[in-house]
Image (cartoon, rainbow, N blue to C red):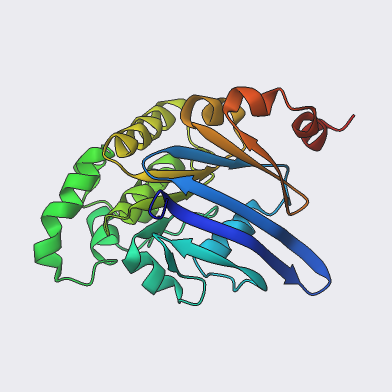
């Protein structure tokens, strides 16, 4: 049925010179669920995120968000339609305060957005650090700050690129709780993550990439039992 899927990626490909990073990949995300995109290093996961958000232009295929084709749009227009993302490498503004890092992404005046920003800082338990420069935060706190900043525009689809990387266990617990809470609020979440324990605890469905191609998809339990997945990760 139309409208069943919030994201529909259809046979997309991306080449960099003679290297094919993504080869005819397709995936569909139902609304209001948590999905994971996994695979060995260099399998094309971040490239696929970049194609969905138009950071990179695809060479073939089509991408639809809420039944509207978006692969021709520029990144900020995709963000305004309701797709938010974090990056593998943290992108906070170190010389702005924690609060200013959230306010800087809004197109409304800062004063009217301040309440929303403080609500999100409380959500990720950074409200007491609102006046601290972002560059002074720990790595894990910067991850939480970037996560909160993505939520400033109230996206319907949230793409998280390795949110658990380098985050200590205490802050990771806060992050995972926040992700579960987002799902409870009806958001759809797609996570790229290497920590399989995080993936198994969070996701309802897993997509597995290998050498730029979609290897398989399924529940965490079925994917973990797939011999092709084990071979892709560990070899024979």
Name the residue at the front extreme: 1
Q: Foreground: 228 or 92?
A: 228
Q: Position of residue 85 (x, y in %)?
A: 43, 56
Front-most of residues 86 and 72: 72
Whether residue 38 is situated above or below residue 111 in the rendered picture: above
Q: Position of residue 186 (x, y in %)?
A: 29, 41
The answer to whether any part of residue 92 appears in the image is yes
Dividing the picture into quarters, in which one does residue 110 lie? Answer: bottom left
Where residue 72 appears, as percent x and y from the top left, is: 50, 77
Residue 64 in the image: above or below residue 194: below
**Quarter where residue 21 is shown:** bottom right
Measuring from the top left, give residue 160's x and y in whole percent.
47, 48
What number of labels is visible? 0
Q: Quadrant of the C terminus?
A: top right
Residue 136 can be seen, yes or no: no
Q: Nearer the viewer, residue 2 or 120?
A: 2
Q: Residue at x 44, y 71 (%)?
A: 75
Residue found at x 61% / y 58%? 48
Q: Quadrant of residue 178?
A: top left
């Amino acid at each position: 049925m139309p409208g069943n899927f919030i994201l529909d990626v259809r046979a997309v490909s991306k080449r960099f010179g003679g290297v094919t990073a993504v080869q005819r990949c397709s995936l569909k995300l139902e609304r209001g669920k948590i999905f994971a995109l996994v695979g060995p290093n260099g399998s094309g996961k971040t490239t696929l995120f970049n194609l969905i958000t138009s950071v990179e232009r695809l060479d073939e295929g089509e991408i639809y968000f809420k039944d509207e084709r978006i692969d021709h749009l520029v990144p900020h227009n995709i963000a305004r339609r309701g797709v938010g993302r974090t990056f593998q490498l943290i992108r906070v503004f170190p010389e702005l305060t924690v609060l200013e890092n959230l306010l800087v992404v809004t197109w409304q005046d800062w004063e009217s957005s301040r309440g929303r920003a403080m609500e999100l800082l409380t959500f990720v338990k950074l409200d007491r650090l609102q006046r601290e420069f972002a560059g002074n935060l720990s790595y894990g706190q910067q991850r939480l700050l970037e996560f909160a900043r993505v939520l400033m525009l109230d996206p319907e689809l949230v793409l998280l690129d390795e949110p658990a990387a380098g985050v200590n266990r205490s802050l990771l617990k806060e992050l995972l709780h926040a992700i579960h809470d987002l799902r409870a609020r009806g958001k759809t979440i797609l996570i790229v993550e290497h920590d399989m324990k995080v993936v198994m605890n969070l996701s309802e469905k897993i997509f597995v990439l290998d050498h730029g191609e979609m290897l398989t998809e399924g529940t965490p339990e079925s994917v973990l039992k797939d011999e092709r997945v084990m071979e892709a990760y560990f070899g024979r």
